Image (cartoon, grey):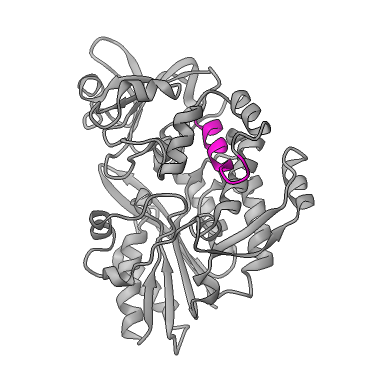
Amino acid sequence: MKELYYTDRAGISLDKVASMCDELLAQYTGLKKVLIVPPDYTRCYSFAGEITKILYPRLKAMGAEVKVMPALGTHMPVSPEEKQKFFGDVVPDEDILVHHWQSDTTVLGKVPQEVVSEISKGLYVTDIEVEVNHLLVDGGFDLILSVGQVVPHEVVGMANYSKNLFVGLGGRAMINKSHMLSAICGMEQALGVRDCPARVLYDYAQQHFIDGKLPVVFLQTVTTRENDVTSLNGLYIGDSRVPFEKACELAQELNIVHVERRAKKVVTYLDPEELKTTWVGNKGIYRTRMIVADGGELVILAPGVRAFGENEEMDAMTRKFGYKGRDYVLDLFNKGAFGTDKIMSAAHLIQGSTDGRFTVTYCTKPELMSKEEIESVGYQWANYDEISKRYDPHTLKEGWNTLPDGEEIYFVGTPALGLWKCDD
């Protein structure tokens, strides 16, 4: 296919997006069945909802049967309210498929343990089964459009591309083991790095089991957000790795904020409509941890957080073991506490721990998540309604703020949209 690349740091118009989608679809004739794979609502700033709303009616007008399967991974299904916000009235409920990561997958093959060992430099040695939703293989789709945002990410360095398939539509083995690979190799060595260990793993799986075998085209976005307005700054479309590479280059420029010094107190805000659990809300930790000073405090304003895990299984594991440090969790892992099918929980608990370098204060509404619950997993707690009077997320400005009493803080309003680094 002819790949399509467009960059505009000032923002790409919907008309331009529509013309690029038209140019993409003009390359395909006789389409009978098409699958669109956008992210779930925790990536609501990805512009994937808008692109899906452009693609869906055009494909229907071409006479194709069209299904939309959000790349949920282990996240909870998209709610009716989220569907409305993401897709409007364009995509009917009957055409939205739900991916069940525990039961809906088929195994395409394995990444051999010697490859995993080489990737991890001997830190993690295991075969890794490559699983995807079975409909990618046997659903009869003659075009699969994977739509998603490239942004710094705690597991895979830079999100999207093949991750949208192997995790978003993946199964237990791949999600568990790839997350553990990343955690063992070290999150801070992955964040914002394109070719980190998990990405090399997914590249191997992409090259051996997807390329030339499944009709996948990637639509990669890069976005920014300012004054509550999300802008699309890059759109890269193609069936090779090049669109991802171009998106990475722009995202590393626009979505990584280089801070001149570490802050003793960092305050970050989790949108209550977007982030409802610590499983996804801990992006507030991952994306800001590199700017928190040793002995400092990270305050997470989390008015919508009401659970630890996105599903009952992972919620229970978090409540049982908590965010109590890398060595503690690795010891449990080596003793088999996570079995072979809950390894992703171990990875998540490692990544959500600070190993005592700084403290995390989760500020929740007590009717949604209590003080006792938050403290039981190793974090400090504060009442959101009280602390938001001092740190009001709607009046603080991005970056450095000095409060009336002289306290200096660094504020991050949308942690999921970037990475904040102190280059020392």
* Left or right of 391 in this view: 26: right
The N terminus appears in which quarter of the rendering? bottom right
Q: Residue at x 48, y 26 (%)?
A: 291
Instruction: Pick whichever, 337 or 331, lies toward us.
Output: 337
Span highlighted in magenta in the image: 339-352
Instruction: Pick whichever, 206 or 340, lies toward us.
Output: 340
Instruction: Pick whichever, 301 or 326, lies toward us.
Output: 326
Q: Is 171 located above or below residue 320 in the figure?
A: below
Is residue 174 visible in the rendered image? The answer is yes
Q: Is 365 located above or below residue 42 in the figure?
A: above
Q: Residue at x 27, y 68 (%)?
A: 93
- Magenta run includes residue 12: no
Q: Splitting the image into 4 quarters, where does residue 366 fall?
A: top left
Residue 94, percent across and down? Answer: 30, 72
Is residue 298 visible in the rendered image? The answer is no
Q: Splitting the image into 4 quarters, where does residue 15 fall?
A: bottom left
Residue 254, percent across and down? Answer: 44, 45
**How many numbered marks, from 0 up?**
0
* Left or right of 209 in this view: 133: left
Q: Residue at x 64, y 75 (%)?
A: 212
Residue 409, percent across and down? Answer: 35, 20
For this orientation, the residue located farthest to the top is: 405
The C terminus appears in which quarter of the rendering? top right
Q: Is 132 located above or below residue 377 in the figure?
A: below
* Left or right of 346 in this view: 398: left
Q: Is 287 located above or below residue 79 in the figure?
A: above
Q: Please, what is the dominant secondary structure of the magenta stretch?
A: helix
